[in-house]
Image (cartoon, helix red, strand yellow):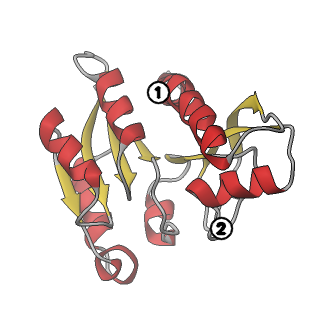
Amino acid sequence: MKRIVIFASGSGTNAENLIKFFHNRDNASVIQVLTNNPHAKVLDRCKTLKVSALSFNKIAFSDTNDVLNILKASKPDLIVLAGFLWKFPENILNEFPNKVINVHPALLPKYGGKGMYGMHVHKAVVENKEIETGITIHYVNEHYDEGAVIFQAKCKVLPSDSAEDVAKKIHLLEMEHFPKVVESLLFSHE
């Protein structure tokens, strides 16, 4: 049984989608969700879906090995960042090489880096009159949005699209592709 741990900071729609995708599977499951936001809606989703969830603070994450020790105890085959906003610390990346992935709401390397998440990305895409955007699923390294690209999916941006319209298109791409890419990564090295 492959073990997935998800990190999320917000509402948790991607986390919920992944949990449901792997629910009742005999080969993989989401065993835990970790969040840096004690008020994140993802915690409510996990309660409803009966998945273990914990919140932690910056000290536990970056200044001590507390979160690392939780991960070591969980023994994840893959760590999935789904709307997680903090930069990942090197102690965790070193312990789990090529086992931490993220979904980014743009076609990296465009619109990546610190502060480029959610609506900030979609507003920039619209303001720059891009004709396409999409999602990038990539490995996480010590820099924001600079890890090796695993998968990209594109969608058109119409001249009439608002940032909210773009957000909806991106959300649909995430819902469709993210679970499948996670699944393929879990089973590609067998």
What label sits on residue 143 in the rendered view?
A: 2
Name the one closer to the observer, 170 or 97.
170
Secondary element at tag 2: loop
Q: Nearer the viewer, mark 2 or mark 1?
A: 1
Q: Which quadrant of the figure has residue 30?
A: top left
**Disc 2, disc 1: CB below 8 Å?**
no
Name the residue at the front extreme: 160
Query: The N terminus is located in which quarter?
Result: top left
52 in relation to 9, above or below: above
- How much space separates mark 2 and mark 1, taking CA atoms? 24 Å
Q: Residue at left 20%, top 42%?
A: 46
As shown in the figure, which amino acid type bears the numbered disc 2? Answer: His
- Find residue 147 and report its horizontal and vertical position in percent: 68, 54
- Find residue 7 and report its horizontal and vertical position in percent: 37, 53
Q: Residue at left 66%, top 48%?
A: 163
- Find residue 117 and report its horizontal and vertical position in percent: 59, 59
As shown in the figure, which amino acid type bears the numbered disc 1? Answer: Pro
What label sits on residue 179 in the rendered view?
A: 1
Q: Residue at left 53%, top 46%?
A: 101
Name the one closer to the observer, 87 or 122.
122
Name the one closer to the observer, 3 or 86.
86
- Find residue 58 and report its horizontal and vertical position in percent: 35, 79
74 in relation to 85, above or below: above
Q: Describe residue 62's horizontal placement relative to residue 106 as left or right.
A: left
